[in-house]
Each structure stands twice: as C-alpha cells, then as structure tokens.
Amino acid sequence: MRLNLENFDENVQQSIDKANRMRLLLNVNQLNVCNAVLAALNEQPSVENQHSRLFFMDRPAGSVKTFTYNYLIAETIYRGFKSATAAWTGIAATLLTNGSTLHGLFKLPIPILDNSTCNVTPNSGIF
C-alpha cells in the first residue's frame, strides 16, 4: 500500500489508541479469533506452517464481524504490519478501516469472466 509518511506517526498513535479502546470491548469469541490471528502473524513463515496465516471468519449478519476486523486492522497497524482491507461490496468496504472493494484493490475487471486476471503485479506499487 502507498503510505502517507507525512502523518505516519500520528496514524500509528491513532491505531494504538483505537486498538486499546476496542480490545476492551471484544467478547470471548472475538478475542480468541484475534489472538489466533495475531499469534500467526508473529510466527516466522515456514513450509510447515505456510497455511497458518489464512483465516476465514463466517458468521451471520449482525454478529460483529466488522468490529472484529476493524480491531485487527488497528492492532496490526499498531504492531507495524502493512494491511489491505477489502470487501465484495462498496457498502461493506465503507465499514472497514481503509476499506476498498476487491475489484478496486486488485484491479479486477467487471464483469469477472472465467479467463479474467488480476491487474496488479508484484511491482505495481499497490502493496
């Protein structure tokens, strides 16, 4: 992601404050999910644990997934990780901190066809 270094320290401090406030509001299930994700981020990737950083959270609407995601976004920024947040729809993306649509983030064509490809390259500067 392109970082705005001009406000970097201020943004990190905002993330620290936000993470600290939100952590107190997590329920037991949310806290367990967040602890698992954060523990995986602290592990050094290897062949044995190459998939331990992939998580999928599926719950019904209204079960505070977005709150959990936003806490994780704040916490990872606070810990110095780069993150990109995306959702399928624009409405869902607006609820995520620094959110965008998957189409926008990965430069996906509309409509997506069987032979469609992502238009982001490793050197594109997006991440």
Image (cartoon, rainbow, N blue to C red):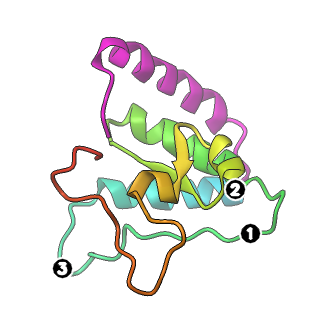
Which span is picked out in magenta?
1-27
Dot 2 crowding, Cα within 10 Å, few <14, some 14–19, many 20+: some
Q: Nearer the viewer, residue 110 or 59?
A: 110
Q: CA distance from mark 3 to mark 1?
A: 30 Å
| Number of numbered discs on residues | 3
Q: Is residue 50 above or below residue 92?
A: below
Disc 2 designates what residue?
65
Asked whether the residues under the numbered discs 2 and 1 touch, taking CB atoms below 8 Å apart as contact, a structural biologist would say yes
Q: Quadrant of residue 4?
A: top left
Instruction: Describe the element under mark 1 as helix, strand or loop.
Output: loop
In this view, the residue farthest toward the bottom is 114
What residue type is disc 3 on? Val
What residue type is disc 1 on? Arg
Residue in the image at 21% along x and 66% along y: 45
Disc 3 designates what residue?
47
Q: Nearer the viewer, residue 87 or 81?
A: 87
Q: Is residue 121 above or below residue 115?
A: above
